[in-house]
Image: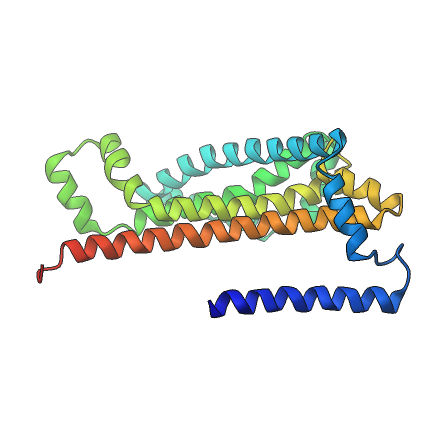
Amino acid sequence: MKKTSLMILSVFILFLIWLIGFAWVNNPLLLPSPTRVGMAFVDLFRYAASLNAMGMSFLRLVIAMSGSLILGSVLGIIAGFKPWFAVFFQPVAAVLRSVPVVSVIVILLIFFGFSVTPYVITFLMIFPLIYQAFHDGIIGIDTELIDVYRLEDNRKWSGLWHCYLPLMRSRIRTVMLQSAGLGIKVLIMAEYLSQTRTSIGNSLYLAKINLAYDTVFAWTILLILLALAIEIGINLFKNKDASMIIIKGTKKSPTD
């Protein structure tokens, strides 16, 4: 309850700062009022162009995440079982994690154009997270659990499906939700810079050049709410997994 109250208080303070800033600037073109932004936010769900932009951006995110999951999981599992491959692939993963996003977008625009770049840049930003999660998940499993399973079934693919992946479930859930949060930010930036048609990024750009700052604020609030929803999802999954571990540990307690 105390945590919820503090969060509500924080939101109220931010809203109050917005109202003070609006009164001080006294120029709706520079800082629109909360009322106008609220109306613009509702309008996002009333017009087909906005809904199409949301749908296409979401579709791009799903496609990029699917490609990242497939390739990242396969290479991560290989690296987990084959240490030599992990050492070989480590420079590639390090470069993808450290390279500036804007630089990659500019380079990819030259080679792929505005329509393909959002997919590629989102894939490249998410892929290292998924790869590292699967690699660390494989090597982080208790070897005693693996030995116990091998006494019953020594088949590699069966062990991967029935032993390794279930033990990595919490890590996989978390990295997928984290990838979704990062993917949204990177995708919108890529759409904005590459001027991808029918996208949230392009809608933000058009609102900016048309001085419709209430719409810019509305899109921003929508993205913030989406990021918060993903963060809440991460915390819920973590708490759920932690609760399951406690329950299983209680059932196996020798005092029962």
**Percent position of residue 192, x then y:** 75, 42
Q: Position of residue 91 (x, y in %)?
A: 50, 48
Residue 62 placement: quadrant = top right
Answer yes or no: is residue 92 visible: no
Give x and y (percent) for residue 34. Answer: 77, 56
Instruction: Give above or below for 47 relative to 193.
Output: above
Q: Residue at x 33, y 51 (%)?
A: 241
The quarter in which the C terminus is drawn is: bottom left
**Is 8 located above or below residue 100 in the figure?**
below
Q: Which residue occupies the foreground of this view, 107 or 28?
A: 28
Report the residue at 63% width, 64% height from top. Answer: 11
Q: Nearer the viewer, residue 183 or 225?
A: 225
Q: How is the image coloured?
A: rainbow
x and y, in percent, of residue 159 in the image: 23, 35
Location of residue 63 with respect to 172 vertically, above or below? above
Residue at 40% in and 35% down: 74
